[in-house]
Image (cartoon, helix red, strand yellow):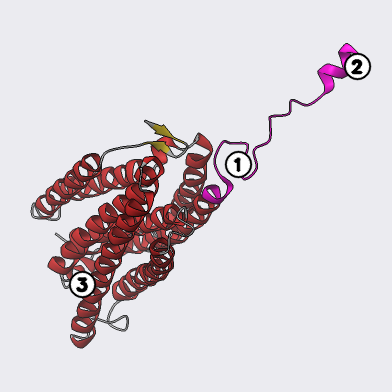
Amino acid sequence: MMTPTGPIHSTAFFVKIWIVLLVLMGLSLLAAGMGHTTAAISTIFLIAAVKALLVLAYYMGLAWEPKAVWAIGIAALACVVIFFVVLIPDIVYVYGD
Amino acid sequence: MSHAASIAQPVLRPSREGVHPAGIPIWRLGIWWFLGSEVAVFGGLIATFLLYRLRHPEWVSEMAHTISWVGATNTIILLTSSLTMILAHHYAIATAGHAFDPQKFIRKGATFLGITNLLGLCFLGFKAYEYTHEIGAGLVPARSLFWGFYFLMTGLHGLHVIGGLVANTVVYSNLRRGLHVRRIESAGIYWHFVDVVWIFLFPLLYLSAG
C-alpha cells in the first residue's frame, strides 16, 4: 500500500534491515581483526558505506523521495570530496618532506 | 488569446499548499536541507581527519588506545535505536492513518519513541565512561592531534545526540496527547542521520587501527 511518504512496510521489514545492519557490523569487526592492511581497511569502509545506504534508503525513506532530495546530499558530498582533494598537497604532502 | 501568446504562457502546475514543486512537503524538504548542511559539517571534519591521518601514519599507535568494545556496543545501541525510531514512525503515522483506533497506534509509536530515547541515553552513558577512562589515562589533545580530532568528532556527534533526545522528548510529549503526530517523521529523519554519522565515525576512530 502506498502513502505520500512511500509504501507501508510491515514491522518485519524494518527488523530484517536491522538484522542485516548488525550482520554487516559483525563483518566489519571480523575485517578489523585481519590487521592493518589496505584490503581490511577498504572492506571496513565499504561495509560502512553499505550500512549508511541501507539506513538512508529504508529508514530515512530516501528510496521514495524525489531525486531533488538526493541532489541535496550529493551536492554536499561533492563539496566535501573537492575539499579533500584540493587540500591533499597542503596537508598530506609538505614540501621538503 | 492568440496562438503565439498561448505558447508564450508559462506552464503552471496546479499549486498544492505546503508542497514543493519537486513533489515533497516543504517541511520534509526543510529537514533534508538541514541534513545537507550537516553532511558538509561532519564530512568536512572527517575529510580533514583523513588528510591528517594520511600525514601521520604513527597515529595507528594512538588509535589502538580507543576502547573498541565500547565503540561496538554504542554502534549496536544506535542501530537498535534507529529500528525503534522507524517503528515509532510506522505505528504513529503509517499504521494509525489506516487504523480503526488511531490513538492506540499513536501511543504505541510514543512507546517506541521513548525506547529510542532510553537507548540514546545509554549511548551517552557509555560515551561518558569512555571519556572518563581516556582523560584519566592522559589520552587528551595535548598528547596528540589524533585525540583532538577524536574528542572533537565524537563530542560534536554527542551534542547532536543530545539535541535529538531533546527533540524526541518534545515529540514524545506531543504523541502522548495525540498532537502534531507528523513531527515524528522529522525527528526520525534527524535521528537516523545521527546514526549514519556514527556508522562512519566508528570504523574511522576505532577499527582502522588494526
**Which amino acid, mark 2?**
Met
Q: Earlier in the sequence, mark 2 or mark 3?
A: 2
Element on which disc 2 rests: loop
Q: Position of residue B153 (x, y in %)?
A: 35, 68
Instruction: Write down the residue under mark 3.
Output: B62
Please give the chain letter of the residue carrying mark 3.
Answer: B
**Horizontal side, residue B42 vs residue B200: left or right:** right
Q: Quadrant of the N terminus of chain B?
A: top right
Element on which disc 1 rests: loop
In terms of secondary structure, what is the magenta stretch mainly?
loop
User: Could you tell me which residue is drawn at 56 percent across and 36 percent down?
Assistant: B23
Element on which disc 3 rests: helix
Instruction: Write down the residue under mark 1.
Output: B19
User: Could you tell me which residue is drawn at 41 percent across and 43 percent down?
Assistant: B97
C-alpha separation, residue under disc 2 versus residue under disc 3: 76 Å
Span of residues in magenta: B1-29
Q: Is residue B28 magenta?
A: yes
- Foreground disc of the pair 2, 3: 2
Q: Earlier in the sequence, mark 3 or mark 1?
A: 1
Asked whether A60 or B152 is in front, the reply is: A60
User: Could you tell me which residue is drawn at 18 percent across and 43 percent down?
Assistant: A20
Q: Position of residue B101 (x, y in %)?
A: 35, 48
Residue B130 makes an appearance in the image: yes
